[in-house]
Structures are given as C-alpha cells and as structure tokens.
Image (spheres, rainbow, N blue to C red):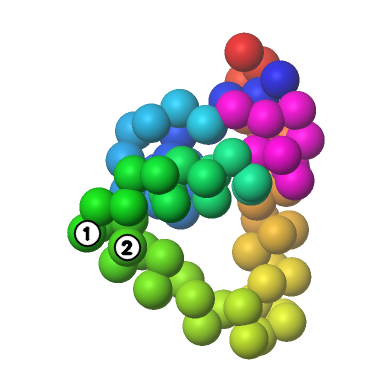
C-alpha cells in the first residue's frame, strides 16, 4: 500500500491518502475531498473540473499521477 498527502495529489491539505493501486488512490482522494468539503477543497475541485472535458489534459494528469504513485512510499 502506498501513501501520499492530499497536496501531493493536487489537493490542498496534508491529510494522508492511501491506496494499493493508482485507481484506488484516486478514488480515496476523491472520497477525502468530498468528505472534507470545505471551501479550499471545493475551490480545488471547481478548478480541476474543466479538465474532465479535455482528454489530453486527463491523459497527462493520469500519466503524472501514476509516476507520483510509483514513487510514493509504502505504508
């Protein structure tokens, strides 16, 4: 299992997020952002929302994210 902070996942806080795979880490990150749902997390989600309509941006984000996940420390 790997661990990263919310900030390392393009978020806004130092909460530790864990996952066994990039997909699980991403899902756990989204759950975290939705559960906290403060102004900072809301603003970050709004900032990132347009990317969903740009396949190239999503592809780059996921490529970068998978590299970060690979380099993340084990729990």
**Rendered position, 54 above or below 48:** below
Give how far across and how far down residue 60 sits, in percent: 69, 68
Left or right of 74? Residue 45 is: left
* Distance from the alpha carbon under mark 1 to that under mark 2: 5 Å
Q: Quadrant of the N terminus?
A: top right
Give how far across and how far down residue 38 sits, in percent: 25, 52
**Rendered position, 59 above or below 23:** below
Residue on which the image places disc 1: 39
Q: Residue furthest front?
A: 35
**Quadrant of res 29:** top right
For label 1, the SS is helix
Q: Which residue appears at 62% of the width and 21% of the height?
A: 73
**Rendered position, 60 above or below 50:** above
Give how far across and how far down residue 34 sits, in percent: 43, 51
Left or right of 44? Residue 63 is: right
For label 2, the SS is helix
Give yes or no for contact between labels 1 and 2 (Cβ–Cβ under 8 Å). Answer: yes
**Quadrant of res 74:** top right
Q: Which residue appears at 52% of the width and 31% of the height?
A: 17
Q: Residue furthest left?
A: 39
Q: Which mark is residue 19?
A: none
Q: Mark 1 Cα within 10 Å, few/some/many (few <14, many 20+)?
A: few
Q: Mark 2 Cα within 10 Å, few/some/many (few <14, many 20+)?
A: some
Report the span colored magenta.
18-25
**Quadrant of res 57:** bottom right
Give how far across and how far down residue 30 sits, in percent: 54, 50
Left or right of 49? Residue 1 is: right
Which residue is more in the foreground, 40 or 38? 38
Which residue is more in the foreground, 36 or 64? 36
**Magenta region includes residue 38:** no
Q: Quadrant of the C terminus?
A: top right
Residue on which the image places disc 2: 42
């Amino acid at each position: 299992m790997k661990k990263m902070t919310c900030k390392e996942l393009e978020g806004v806080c130092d909460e530790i997020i864990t996952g066994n795979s990039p997909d699980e880490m991403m899902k756990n990150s989204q759950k975290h952002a939705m559960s906290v749902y403060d102004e900072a997390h809301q603003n970050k989600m709004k900032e990132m929302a347009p990317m969903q309509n740009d396949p190239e941006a999503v592809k780059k984000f996921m490529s970068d994210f998978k590299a970060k996940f690979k380099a993340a420390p084990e729990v």
